[in-house]
Amino acid sequence: MNARHIVWTVTAALVLVGLACVGLRLYARQQARLSSGDSLWRITYKVKFYAARTGATLRVSAPRETTHARVFRHDIQYAGLLAQRLRSSRELSRELAFASLGSGPHTMTARFDLHLSPKDRWRPTDPTTPLTPDLQNRYLRNTDDIPTDAPLVLETLARLQAPPPTNIAQRLFDFCVHDLGAGDERAPHDVLTALQQHAASPIGRARVFVALCRAAGLPARLVTGLALEPSAASQPQYWAEAYVDKQWVPFDPSNGLSGDLPERFVPVTRDRLEIVRGTDISELETRVEILRLPPGPGASRFGRSRLGAIFDLTRLPLDMHEPLSLLLLLPLGALVTALFRVVIGLRTYGTFTPTLLALSFVYADWITGLMTFTAVLALGLTSRALLEQLKLLVVPRLSVLLTLVVLGIMFMVSALDYFNLTPSAQAVILPMVILTMTIERFYLTSEEDNPLFALKLLAETLLVGACCYGVLRWRAVGELMFTFPELHLFTIAALVLLGRYPGYRWTELWRFRDLKKP
């Protein structure tokens, strides 16, 4: 069997295996059924705000996953905003951060689909690690909202500690439930007024409990969450958590619940009341809608005890979905580069340089990113020409060049920020090693051939990189690859076929067009 037959056999095998894997996954998703008592829910945030300037930030806290609830799908729409990385705090909240690309009114819609189960099915995102000294000080501190050293708080605590209780947290909880009258949102929110009037709103009750716990030396914190009940305008739920017997125990004075809260209670953020907040913004309006979804395929997940869960990437935490989806698009960028080099005939500086450059622009404003690339490239080429006079060895020369590239990028970021041309530093961070090697290759090409040829090669690299950028920005394909990673077997099959491409490159047909003339 010759090489050509082997290539076609391998390609056919890859396609067949890929089809089989996709079919098996689709079959498994269709066969997935919700267990008895399980339900699916959709939480939708609809946010409106006015940005005072370019770069105004909006932070949206995503629902936290618990042993009973898990986010299995999310969708975020944010026209006129630049998405930044999902900021994750294992103790407090996971925040989706956005920066405005201009001043004026903006909107953002975020949807989170949750699978709710009465059983302990998943690992919560909140750890049960021991309380560190820094966290202990944080949850014992005196603040304006939690005045632990106020005389009225200390007087109330002294009265509740006589006689000394065996469970101080439960004693304080009973006081907040029975001695503080239940009120609506018009009732007192602050601790001192609530203690004076013996009535409090749900926020006020939770704050009184936290203040009394901290005054008693028991770490405590506020929790803002949502109750999974159908509502077109759901209101946040407020409760507290106290650190008892080396674990966080929830206490909900408004509903008289302690220990284990109902599974429909989903925490969103801790030690803070706002689900949505921002800087340099005004007229912030947040509407939360909760809808129960009909059962559908794909919501159920393999149990963690089954080895098949390894192949289900959608079970991973929410903050890993976007970067992993982007990584799964890199092979498609390599496929685009191979297509341009093998079939079309364009040449680039390095095999993966276009893809990696495109990757650095995915979270960026491409205009400011291109400005940074041009400025740093000019600085690097000038520095490379000066370094040539020193006759350095390759490794030290590249190291010096890398240092200058890093400094150039940092000061360019600072300059763009000074002139309010970019909303965030991460928008112009380029792959410094790739940029260093591009500068080195550009200089060597200029010396060995001519500067015009080097510029042509750079232009072709940027053209291929722009096409790779279009692929990497294709969010729907990234989500598809994240759900069906076996689709990359087709990518490998296409690359194998490209590796045996026997035809002419398109650019060669143009170069030798005169030969067609009689």
Image (tube, helix red, strand yellow):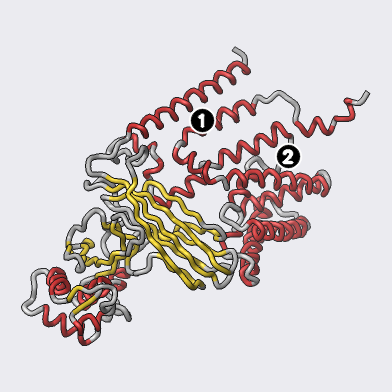
368 left or right, relative to 474: right
In the depicted view, which residue is nearer to us: 108 or 304? 108
| Number of other residues with Cα within 10 Å of mark 2, as a class: few under 14, some 14 to 19, many 20 or more | some
Which residue is found at the position 28% from the left and 67% from the top?
238
Answer few, some or many: residues within 10 Å of disc 1's Cα (few below 14, many 20 plus, some between 14 and 19): some
Work out which quarter of the rendered image holds the N terminus and state it: top right
* Residue 113: image tag: none
Q: How far separated are the C-alphas under marks 2 and 1?
A: 26 Å
Q: What amino acid type is highlighted by mark number 1?
A: Leu
The circle on residue 347 is: 2
Residue 391 x, y percent position in the rendering: 75, 54
Residue 178 rendering spot, x and y as whole percentages: 13, 73
Q: Nearer the viewer, residue 444 or 141?
A: 141
- The percent position of residue 98, horizontal first and vertical second, equals 50, 62
Mark 2: secondary structure:
loop
Asked where in the image residue 379 lies, by quadrant, the reply is bottom right
